[in-house]
Image (cartoon, rainbow, N blue to C red):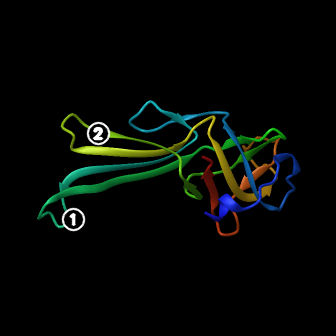
Amino acid sequence: MFLKLKRRTDVGNLAQGDDRVVEGKVTAAREMTVPGTSTKCVFFFHLTEAWQHGPRGRGRKMWVPQNVRQKCEGFYLEDGTGRVWIAGDGETMDVQGGVEESGPIGKKGKGRYLARMIRVGDVVRVRGIVDKPRGSEPGDVMVMRPTKKGVLQVVFRQ
């Protein structure tokens, strides 16, 4: 909530070591596919559930979570003044909002999935620490990493 209200910085004005908020359009060097679908994205949260008896094996049936995955390969954020690499690994990202997709798994409908994702072209606001590139990250741009709390916050703009 507070990330929506915090003042944003133009990408062209970022300096190393600053805790900043940037807003822009998502672009990617490479996209990945959400498991079980053909949807392309740069980040996904994927939950699968099964229709079965509760945790003790008795009583009425309910949707029981089976698997939860969250993955990000990193992506660019462009705002017109430049671009910055968002170095998210999925585990350190707190994504609020986004595009959701859901559907059944299997022929008999005994399973279902829910996927929330960030796709190329989405407009997001990101809060993180500005740093220089390391290792396999693109060397031509600044990089945003998780804050001191260990979280890279991402909020979708409506």
Q: Tell me the residue at 38%/36% (across/down).
A: 36
Q: Mark 1: few, some, or many residues within 10 Å (few <14, many ≥20)?
A: few
Q: Position of residue 33 (x, y in %)?
A: 49, 35
Image quadrant where one finds the N terminus: bottom right
Q: Is residue 124 left or right of residue 133?
A: left
The answer to whether residue 36 is above or below residue 133 is above
17 or 118, nearer to the observer: 118
Q: Give whichever of 16, 121 is nearer the camera.
A: 121
Quadrant of the image occupied by residue 3: bottom right
Q: Secondary structure at mark 2?
A: strand
Query: Which numbered circle lies on residue 3?
Result: none
Which residue occupies 66% across, 35% down? Answer: 28
Crowding near the residue tagged with mark 2, few <14, some 14–19, many ≥20 C-alpha atoms within 10 Å: some
- Amino acid bearing label 1: Pro
Could you tell me residue 17's position as x and y percent?
Answer: 83, 62
Please give the name of the residue rendered at 81% of the width and 54% of the height, measured from the top-left corner. 9
43, above or below 147, in the image = above
Q: Could you tell me residue 86's position as x and y percent? A: 69, 48
The label nearer to you, 1 versus 2, is 2
**Which residue carries the number 2 mark?**
104
Q: CA distance from mark 1 to mark 2?
A: 21 Å
**Residue at screen point 66% across, 58% down:** 4
Residue carrying label 1: 55
Q: Position of residue 123 (x, y in %)?
A: 65, 42
